[in-house]
Image (cartoon, rainbow, N blue to C red):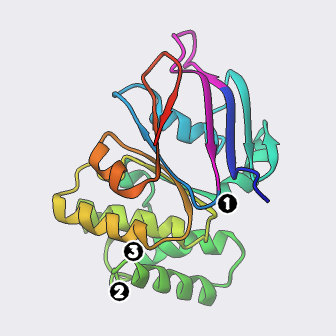
Amino acid sequence: MNEPLIQLEGVAFAYGSSEPVLDGIDLSLGRGERVGLVGPIGCGKTTLLHLIVGLLRPTAGTIRAFGKRRADERDFHEVRRRAGLVFQYADDQLFCPTVLEDVAFGPLNLGQTAAEATAVAAETLDLLGLKGFGGRITYKLSGGEKRLVALATVLAMAPDVLLLDEPTSGLDDTAVDRLTEILAGLPQAMVIASHDREFVKRTTNKTVELPGRSSLTEGP
């Protein structure tokens, strides 16, 4: 019952023959925990999130998720259903003509009927304060609106864990406050990678420092 949802042990990763971006990383995410990943540009925050969901494979170490060790592509299929990654750039996540189609896409892929997926999408948009956005053209949204819709596409699939990559990038103070309030009302465990330490302080209960090519340290 107390086993972590996500656990990384001694994880390392390097792009090609370059120096490791991550080296000997240990990370644990339990139920109800909200972990903030902070550190300088290039320290591996995005890389770490991609490793958790299997978009990249570690060069050393082990990844456990939802009670099982994950190593090959098949292992990560379940992880991607249960751990929703919100990409750093919303345009990488939004590809349908309308907001409703984007948010309904995930539930449809999970086997829901068109009617069920549409209902879930509408409920999720309402939850995020985006009621009435379903018919909006995605590429015409503001940066802040796109980020919330990207979050909606993940929440619509009812994940156990949220992984958010630089969620405040490009947002003004009002949009950051709105996002902070929304995240506070969600039940999922989270890993939030951000250069914005004040946002991390407001939204997480544990901070993990990635100092680059040295060992990882944790703080309260």
Q: Position of residue 100 (x, y in %)?
A: 44, 78
Circle 1 crowding by C-alpha within 10 Å: few under 14, some 14–19, many from 20: many
Mark 3 and mark 2 lie on one chain; the one further toward the N terminus is 3
Which residue appears at 50% of the width and 80% of the height? Answer: 121
Q: Quadrant of residue 144?
A: bottom left
Q: Which residues are magenta?
A: 11-30
Q: Amino acid at mark 1?
A: Arg
Mark 3 and mark 1 lie on one chain; the one further toward the N terminus is 1
Q: Amino acid at mark 2?
A: Lys
Circle on res. 131: 2
Cα separation, mark 3 vs mark 1, equals 25 Å
Q: Secondary structure at mark 3?
A: loop
Who is closer to the viewer here, 83 or 143? 83
Q: Nearer the viewer, mark 1 or mark 2?
A: 1
Q: Which residue is mark 3?
A: 98
Image side of residue 12 versus residue 141, left or right: right
Q: Are marks 1 and 2 in contact (CB under 8 Å)?
A: no
User: 173 above or below 165?
Assistant: below
Q: Which residue is mark 1?
A: 82
Cα separation, mark 3 vs mark 2, equals 14 Å
Q: Quadrant of residue 25?
A: top right
Q: Is residue 31 magenta?
A: no
User: 172 above or below 42?
Assistant: below
Q: Amino acid at mark 3?
A: Thr
Q: Position of residue 133 (x, y in %)?
A: 33, 81
Q: Quadrant of residue 194?
A: top left
